[in-house]
Image (cartoon, rainbow, N blue to C red):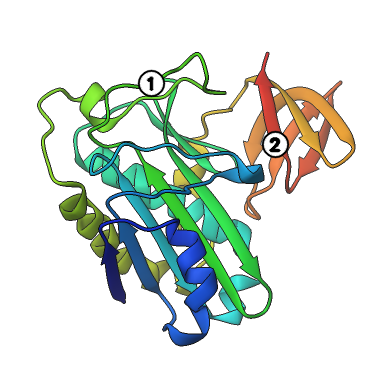
Amino acid sequence: MKHLHFNEIDSTNTYLKQEYQNLDNLTFVTASFQSSGHGRNSRVWNANKEENVLLSYLIKDKDIIEHFSYVSMFSAVVIVKYLESKGLENVSIKWPNDVYVNGKKIAGILLEGAYPNYLIVGIGLNLNQTDFNNKELRHPATSLKLEKSDFNSNPLNESQEIISLFNHLWCDFKGDWLMYDDFIKEHNYLLKKRIKLIDGSRIIIGIVEDIDSQCNLLINIDKEIVKIDSGEIVEIL
């Protein structure tokens, strides 16, 4: 695994999209600041300079790219394990691409790609930032510093620790897609919550029952279990 770090960049995801042909599989890019950070649906991802983990990694293995939903969940698993190693409790995965602590968003995961050439996974993790304008955010935010006041560490050091954890877990994950299935189920933030979800032109309202072994969300709609493989949760009712 190769690691490139920039003091400032437009976006770590954008850099990998532009340079993927010149980079090896599992190249990691981190930055102290992003001038044009973005999340899903081109939403702006604001992060204070030198206060957070801003990380993206490149996948060029076609077999893995085909299983992109597993990659998203695996990335969330890594972040959850990292946060739990720091002593945080009530850490959970909010399908399909967020990590929560005590009901607040601490990390977001963004997948972008061009099959079969590449898949890019971007991760924004709130580390030392303590000022969030939650009135303007779609979901209340938190950080490792807010959850653990005695936390004090350089974001680059923490990025390197996360990359090391990826490296440690990756071989097992690649060998067995279902290795973290139970872990994902146990950390399902949406379990038994009533949600409103948009899937293309459909609006779905129901109670989340599970995440299956293919990383689909299982929703109970009037006693019928519906399998959802993509979509955006717009509200928890």
Q: Amino acid at mark 2?
A: Glu
Numbered disc 2: secondary structure = strand
Callout 2–callout 1 Cβ contact below 8 Å = no
Question: Which mark's residue is nearer the viewer, 2 or 1?
Answer: 2
Numbered disc 1: secondary structure = loop
Task: Determine which residue is flagged by label 1.
Answer: 102
Disc 1 residue crowd, few under 14, some 14–19, many 20+, Cα 10 Å: some
- Spatial CA distance of label 2 from label 1 is 21 Å
Question: In this rendering, is residue 218 above or below 145?
Answer: below
**70 on left or right of 140:** right
Question: In this rendering, is residue 167 above or below 147?
Answer: below
Residue 26, position in %: x, y? 40, 75
Residue that appears at 45% across and 86% down: 22
- Image quadrant for the N terminus? bottom left
Residue that appears at 44% across and 20% down: 103
Task: Determine which residue is flagged by label 2.
Answer: 232
Q: Residue furthest right?
A: 201
The image quarter containing residue 9 is bottom left
Residue 55, position in %: x, y? 37, 56
Question: In this rendering, is residue 106 above or below 96?
Answer: above
**154 on left or right of 220:** left
Nearest the viewer among 122 and 31 is: 31
Residue that appears at 77% across and 23% down: 206
Q: Earlier in the sequence, mark 2 or mark 1?
A: 1
**150 on left or right of 164:** left
- Image quadrant for the C terminus? top right
Q: Amino acid at mark 1?
A: Asn
Nearest the viewer among 119 and 101 is: 119
The image quarter containing residue 107 is top left
Residue 71, position in %: x, y? 53, 60
